Image (spheres, grey):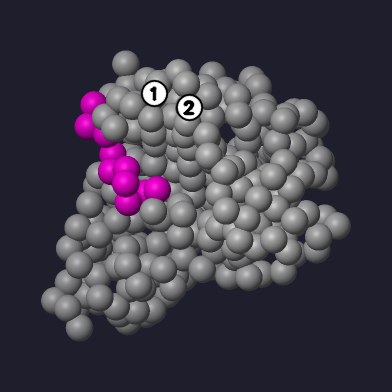
Amino acid sequence: MSALVRSLAACALAATLAAAAEPLPFTAGSTVAGRLASGGQERTFRLHVPRDLRAGAAVVLVLHGTGGDAASMVSVTGFDALADQVGFVVAYPEALGGNWLDLAHGGAADRNTDFAVDLVDAIAATVSIDQRRIYATGLSAGGTMSLLLACDARGRFAAVAPVAGALSPGTLGLIDGMRRPTSVLMINGTADAIVPYWGGALNWTGANTTVAPAPTTAWTIAGRDGCGFFPAWSELPDTAWWDSCRAQRTRWTGGLGGSEVELWTIVGGGHTWPGSRIWLPWFVFGGTCYDIDGTAEIWSFFQRHPRAGSPAG
């Protein structure tokens, strides 16, 4: 066991991460359920620290969709296993009432970006992390929430990767508030019946709003980052011919501080996480693309994009 991990058990995990009366049990290479006081409320999360964690590790926040929780995202994404292989910290924040107020869905639940920042600060007080390598990703409403973290989280996140997320046309202006150029990888399916790829009415219980087209959102972020106007386009090999999906990539490069924006269009893909082994009803969520491993691609993107050093202009 490394000295860093030994110190983890002895330092302020209970005082910093836990609002509970008793210290959280923790052993290297395990996952703990934690509580954190943020915004005057007790918030919950799941934290996984790999056995062989080195100083200056990256942190990835993974946000669940509407009605989901931390455990569901562990299963859907497989981020714990990847963290063990590579050596980064992964945390799964949980929304109040199971729903982030992501502004695309018009809900009245949880849009507290301070919780994400407070969670990152708590992790930083417990283990040695690299402040330039803090990232967020999520599915559906969690994906949209990760976009909000890029726009409104004190410039703490180096890159975000929303999957099947969207902003409403009225909230695209939040992108102008980005404190730093932030690299963004968007993954959206053209056959997503819940969050339509080309924009329009959101198809979800209780929703009464529209979402902007995925290409419009990506193009707007690329402009804010100062990327080149003309993106590069490529189509990935259709290795899983049986999934009725194929993946295309549109990439804006040359942004401030080395920032980039990528839009992965899953032609025929639904409201799903590419490469996930968790079965979801096709008639509700649509097809899952197996030409790419969404988790691996997101981590690869994050690795290439530490936080840019200068604020956006």
Is disc 2 placed on a helix, strand or loop? loop
Residue placed under numbered mark 2 in the picture: 231
Name the image quarter holding the C terminus.
Answer: top left
The image shows residue 160 at horizontal and vertical percentages of 44, 43
Residue at point 72% right, 41% down?
190
Name the image quarter holding the N terminus.
Answer: bottom left
Q: Amino acid at mark 1?
A: Cys
Is disc 1 placed on a helix, strand or loop? loop
Q: Residues within 10 Å of mark 2 (few under 14, many from 20)?
A: some
Q: Which numbered marker is on residue 227?
A: 1
3 to the left or right of 206: left
Of badges 2 and 1, nearer the viewer stands: 2
Based on the displayed image, in which of its 4 quarters is residue 223 positioned?
Answer: top left
* In this view, 232 is above or below 35: above
Residue 87, visible in the rendered structure:
yes
The image shows residue 64 at horizontal and vertical percentages of 59, 55
Q: Which residues are magenta?
A: 301-310
The image shows residue 120 at horizontal and vertical percentages of 34, 51
Q: Nearer the viewer, residue 122 or 172?
A: 172
Q: Which numbered marker is on residue 260?
A: none
> Is there CB contact under 8 Å for labels 2 and 1?
yes
Q: CA distance from mark 2 to mark 1?
A: 9 Å
